[in-house]
Amino acid sequence: MSEKNSTFKRIRNSAVIKNPLLFEAIGLCPVVAITLSLRLAVFLAIVTAIELIVCEVLSSLLLKNIRRHWRVALYVLFGVGVIFPIMGLVNRFFPDMSINFGVYLPLMAVNSLVALHCERVAVKNDLKNSLIDAIAASMSYGAVAIITGLIREFLASGTIGGIDLGLEVTFPALLTPFGGLLIIGFLAAVFKAVINAKYPDASPDRAFDTSEVTRSVRGSLKELMKDELDPYSFGTETAFVRIRKEKRAEKNIEKTQEVNLAEPQKEKKEKVKKPKKSKKVAEAPKRELRVRQTEERTYLDDFSDMLSELEEYKNRPEEAETQEKDGDGQ
Amino acid sequence: MTVFLRLISAAFYVMLFQNLIFNGGYGISEAVRMSAKPRQLVPMTIFITYFSTLVSVICVLLDTIPVINGLSEIMHAIIFIAVVGVLYLITVSLVLLSGKASPRTVRRIGVAAFNTLVFAVPLINYRSAFSVAEAIGSGVGAGIAFVIAVILINSGLKRLEMNKSIPQSFKGTPAMFIYVALLSLAFIGISGNSVFI
């Protein structure tokens, strides 16, 4: 009983809640372009079902131990093995249909529906589960394609299955991809309303993740430079900016070293006279922090900071002298 | 100069006047899914333009060989897909050998190589009898057409996500499909085709 339930749930998820066409937006190209009539839509559904079942079965049997990047090429090879014999048969026995298909029939060899289901299900499950998924996904995909073809043929040509209904007004725009997408959009809304009513817990929106939609397109360039194609490990900076910052940081370090070298001499002098120097020693880390901050700031900020540091540096001996004088006075 | 003009005109043809994604539906699944993840746009565009341009040029050059030129359309399609496959294997091998690629980059190469947009470019070149210059133009134009499509869909998706007055049943993919359909209608208008006879 529980096995039956799990099988039913798997079919329900693959076919309805995660409908590849309506809620995952996979395999849109053939449906949008080919389903101009009921006949073409039925043919598309049959070809897709054969391709998906064969590819998933072969992937489940043969490709489990092959690495992912090589498997992707093999899915296409399986697709070619299924689609091109069909293409030959169509050219020979249905030449009119071959004209309607145009370049779209060979394109089905690289159908994203096949690659996704093989990768997501077939290579991770046994043959039985892969077969169930292939049948469920291809049936749901085919059903949507057939409904789309039916509506398009009726509204755009005024026929159903080639039988003229004698409609006086037709909408030939629906024969373009615009019509296919529009009908799929309304079908998705109807399916979603039914799912929400029948399975309130199931959320079809999860199939199409839009959590990153508001992210910046420009951010992708930074992302690319950061961790994708960064052959010299420059991080988010360009080479020019990095070199300029390095030079600036070197200069700052040299100055701090000079200051640090000067300070111990003063400390020695002051140690003899006065045991107050611990405060000055404690100032050293503060100076380092200031240098780090300047790295992140603009050039003008750096320049003004450097000027103020120079003034402090010039004033420091006078202060020390005055302190010494005060010390003597005391 | 004529060669350059041919290149440019082919690029504009596949970008605007017959936008491969909106007018032909090629690679529309990838464009729609990519528009939901705009941060991946730049690497994906680079890979798609790389594959579409190289495949386009290699296939046109192969077609100048008399033995290949005389073959049927099915055999041409098989050769074109073999070119895509070989180019993919070479690219993945080079990327893996470089040792710098993350698994995500390798995955992107697979998605960029095996999609209907990249495979459609040499088929359209073959049917339109494009020259080498026009093949380069159509290859680069296909990549730019992908960027245009993703940016347009993404900007619409952002607004749809923020819009609270959309009915619950239309939220998500239904509203997005209708929005993409309207974009497609706009591009059909640019192409000059009559949609309401």
Image: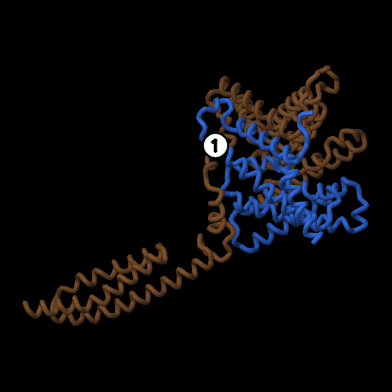
Chain colours: A brown, B blue
A216 displayed left or right of B90? left
Residue where numbered disc 1 is placed? B159
| Residue A273: % across, % down | 13, 80
For the point 90% across and 38% down, which residue is it? A91
For the point 25% across and 79% down, which residue is it? A264
Chain at numbered mark 1: B
Mark 1 surroundings within 10 Å by alpha-carbon count, few (fewer than 14), some (14 through 19), many (20 or more): few
A158 displayed left or right of B28? right
Residue A321 shows up from this direction? yes
A326 displayed left or right of A155? left
Front in this rendered view, residue B171 or A170: A170
* Quadrant in which the N terminus of chain A appears: top right
- Is residue A73 depicted above or below A225 in this figure? above
Residue B84 shows up from this direction? no
- Is residue A230 depicted above or below B37 in this figure? below
For the point 6% across and 77% down, which residue is it? A330
| Residue A249: % across, % down | 41, 71
Front in this rendered view, residue A163 or B189: B189
Circle 1: residue type? Arg
Front in this rendered view, residue A265 or A77: A265
For the point 69% across and 32% down, which residue is it? A181
- Residue sticking out furthest to the top: A166
- Is residue B19 depicted above or below A166 in this figure? below
- Residue sticking out furthest to the left: A330
| Residue B171: % across, % down | 56, 30
